[in-house]
Image (cartoon, grey):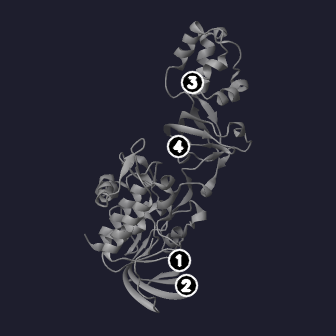
């Protein structure tokens, strides 16, 4: 995909708005911030996280997006942006460009064809707004004289000084460093005196130091996973290193190191009654065989010693079956850690929202300085919510800069 046409790099240039980061939030902001916008990114292509998301089809929003689907030290901060630019607004934009989409599950919307359609839409919107895009451009230094920002940019070995009235930081968090994530946005925040809530990996697989689940690698099962004060009913996946799958990824954002998680392997009620019925109709069958109708056979074999799964179903008393079902519904596990930023889909924490205006995303103390997207302490659930935050926060900052 071609970059937008750019002006020749000269010794110095004056613009209205410099946006650092050509991801979802930065491109969205550029499309709405008015004239005189320059977007810079160190990557070779814009929107790389968009491109790889959703298995290459981009889970671009969620039908059920609301403030309740976001994690922040200040849970009220995201309300303004999400209310003013909703999932329906982005769905309308997608429709304007003729992008076919479908709902997969739990309100998650994906492109029918490719995530590149979303990137092409943002490119088109930026081009329509007259924004410039410089790729493979690094930011060497930033300063502020009280009236405007000066940034030293390096591109193709040449240094350029750019002066801008507004500076928008949209360079994401630390997740997926192989794609160039560095946490640079936090450094900018700290340079200008904005507090940063300690970042940590979110939506990430959990690991166990004893390789206990190695024999189960590849097994998936429906479950209800609880961590902190949150619980999620989706699939879990056993891996060589520990636990993954949607329910684990969701719970990981609420899990704190050293704490346990609660895994309910029988989230749908009725197993006790089914076992009691089988005791009458199939009494000679092994307990493990009967359990194999409700759980993956490899998982039943794995739990055989831990739960004492011996004998025929006819040999099991009501008390024994009740105890067994309770154990399956409350499997307490204490992870050793997570797979970290290497595989984390998002970064929790970030620029403290107390330092920002919830309406404009602008710093309360540094006029013209904005933070949007993942680098802010607002993190969505798995399922398109983080993209919606990128669209909403980028739009909010763009509207403020344009003065509408």
Q: Please, is residue 135 above or below residue 232 in the view?
A: below
Residue that label 3 marks: 294
Question: Is 384 left or right of 137, judged from the image as shown?
Answer: left
Mark closest to the chain's N terminus, 3 or 2: 2
Q: Is residue 242 above or below residue 393?
A: above
State the image quarter where residue 355 is shown.
bottom left
Instruction: Name the N-terminal-most of marks 1 and 4.
Output: 1
The residue beneath circle 4 is: 246
**Residue 4's spot in the image, x, y percent?**
40, 77
Residue 358 quadrant: bottom left
Is residue 286 toward the left or the right of residue 121 in the image?
Answer: right
Residue nearer the viewer, 283 or 101: 101
| Whole-number angstrom distance, CA of label 2 to CA of label 1 | 8 Å
Q: Position of residue 374 (x, y in %)?
A: 47, 61
Q: Is residue 354 visible?
A: no
Location of the N terminus (image quadrant): bottom left
The residue pinned by badge 2 equals 156
Q: CA distance from mark 1 to mark 4?
A: 34 Å
Residue density around tag 4, few if under 14, some if 14–19, many if 20 or more, within 10 Å = many
């Amino acid at each position: 995909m071609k970059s937008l046409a750019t002006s020749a790099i000269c010794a110095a240039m004056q613009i209205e708005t410099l946006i650092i980061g050509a991801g979802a939030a930065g491109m969205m902001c550029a499309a709405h911030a008015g004239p005189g916008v320059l977007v810079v990114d160190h990557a070779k292509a814009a929107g790389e996280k968009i491109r790889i998301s959703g298995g290459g089809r981009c889970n671009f929003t969620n039908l059920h997006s609301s403030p309740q689907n976001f994690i922040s030290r200040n849970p009220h901060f995201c309300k303004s942006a999400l209310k003013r630019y909703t999932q329906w607004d982005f769905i309308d934009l997608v429709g304007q460009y003729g992008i076919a989409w479908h709902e997969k599950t739990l309100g998650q919307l994906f492109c029918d064809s490719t995530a590149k359609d979303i990137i092409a839409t943002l490119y088109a919107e930026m081009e329509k707004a007259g924004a410039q895009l410089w790729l493979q451009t690094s930011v060497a230094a930033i300063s502020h004289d009280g009236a405007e920002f000066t940034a030293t940019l390096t591109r193709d070995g040449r240094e350029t000084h750019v002066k801008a009235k507004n500076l928008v930081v949209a360079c994401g968090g630390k997740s997926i460093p192989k794609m160039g994530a560095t946490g640079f946005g936090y450094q900018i925040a700290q340079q200008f005196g904005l507090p940063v809530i300690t970042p940590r990996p979110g939506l990430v697989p959990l690991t166990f130091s004893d390789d206990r689940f190695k024999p189960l690698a590849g097994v998936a099962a429906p479950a209800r996973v609880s961590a902190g004060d949150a619980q999620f009913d989706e699939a879990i996946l056993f891996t060589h290193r520990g636990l993954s799958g949607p329910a684990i990824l969701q719970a990981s954002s609420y899990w704190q190191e050293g704490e346990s998680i609660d895994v309910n392997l029988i989230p749908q009620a009725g197993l006790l009654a089914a076992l009691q019925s089988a005791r009458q109709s199939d009494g000679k069958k092994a307990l493990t065989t009967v359990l194999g109708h409700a759980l993956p056979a490899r998982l039943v074999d794995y739990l055989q010693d831990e739960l004492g799964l011996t004998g025929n179903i006819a040999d099991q008393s009501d008390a024994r079956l009740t105890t067994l079902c309770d154990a399956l519904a409350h499997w307490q596990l204490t992870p050793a850690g997570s797979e970290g930023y290497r595989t984390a889909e998002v970064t929790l924490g970030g620029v403290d929202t107390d330092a920002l205006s919830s309406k404009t995303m602008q710093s309360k103390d540094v006029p013209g300085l904005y933070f949007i997207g993942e680098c802010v302490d607002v993190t969505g659930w798995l399922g398109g919510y983080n993209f919606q935050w990128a669209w909403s926060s980028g739009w909010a900052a763009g509207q403020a800069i344009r003065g509408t």
